[in-house]
Image (cartoon, rainbow, N blue to C red):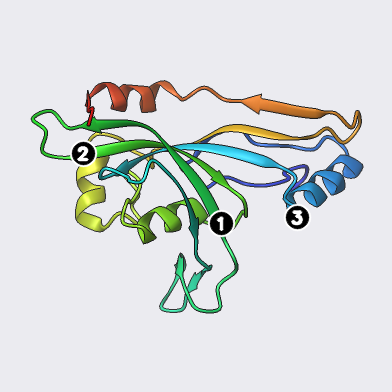
Amino acid sequence: RGGVVHRLDKETSGVLILAKTPEAFVELQRQFKERIVKKVYTALVHGRLVPMEGEIKAPVGRLPWNRKQFGIVAGGRESVTFYKVKAYYQSKGGSELLTLVELNPKTGRTHQIRVHLKYIGYPIFADFLYAGRKVARGDRRVLGRVFLHAAKISFIHPKTGKQVQFESPMPDGLVGVLEKFESYKN
């Protein structure tokens, strides 16, 4: 793994931390473990997410009947995700509502954001694992990957001791998807 301090799901775009020295690696991993690192993600989800701000708190674990998937399971690890609605969209003709949401995972479990959003009934656009086969197949005609982007990350620099923040603008492919939908106000 070299200096890879944390990871993103295969189809998730955005900012990632790499350590240049073993000392920085250990320090950054400590910050993740102690939840000092703050992460902000952006996702497009199916449905009109309400309320406009909230907390999702549900234990995430590997599904015993499908080792590639995670879900809300008894005995899973404590997982907390905060969210805030950024905008609502509708498909042309208004047949479907979508929500652009900002997410702040307090914990960092595998597939946490994807599982939490599915759990509350708002799966991520084009999520082949958690949106359902039929929905994901339709979404994948519009976008060939999950609409999940690691937009910001902040942590204490291991050498200077100062708080630093890095941002990654939303990729053109995701912006292009949003442009295919109409803004929805209500």
Disc 2 marks which amino acid? Leu
Q: Are marks 3 and 2 in contact (CB under 8 Å)?
A: no
Q: Position of residue 88 (x, y in %)?
A: 29, 32
Q: Quadrant of residue 53?
A: top left
Q: Quadrant of residue 94?
A: top left
Residue 135 vertical placement versus 172 (above, below): below
Residue 1 vertical placement versus 71 (above, below): above
Point 55% across, 78% down: residue: 75
Mark number, residue 97: 2
Residue 37 vertical placement versus 167 (above, below): below
Whether residue 10 is visible, yes or no, is no
Mark number, residue 33: 3
Whether residue 51 is visible, yes or no, is yes
Q: Count neighbours of disc 2 (C-alpha within 10 A) and say few if under 14, some if 14 to 19, many if 20 or more.
A: some
Residue labelled with disc 1: 80
Q: Count neighbours of disc 3 (C-alpha within 10 A) and say few if under 14, some if 14 to 19, many if 20 or more.
A: few
Disc 1 marks which amino acid? Val
Q: Position of residue 151 (x, y in %)?
A: 54, 31
Q: Secondary structure at mark 3?
A: helix
Q: Secondary structure at mark 1?
A: strand
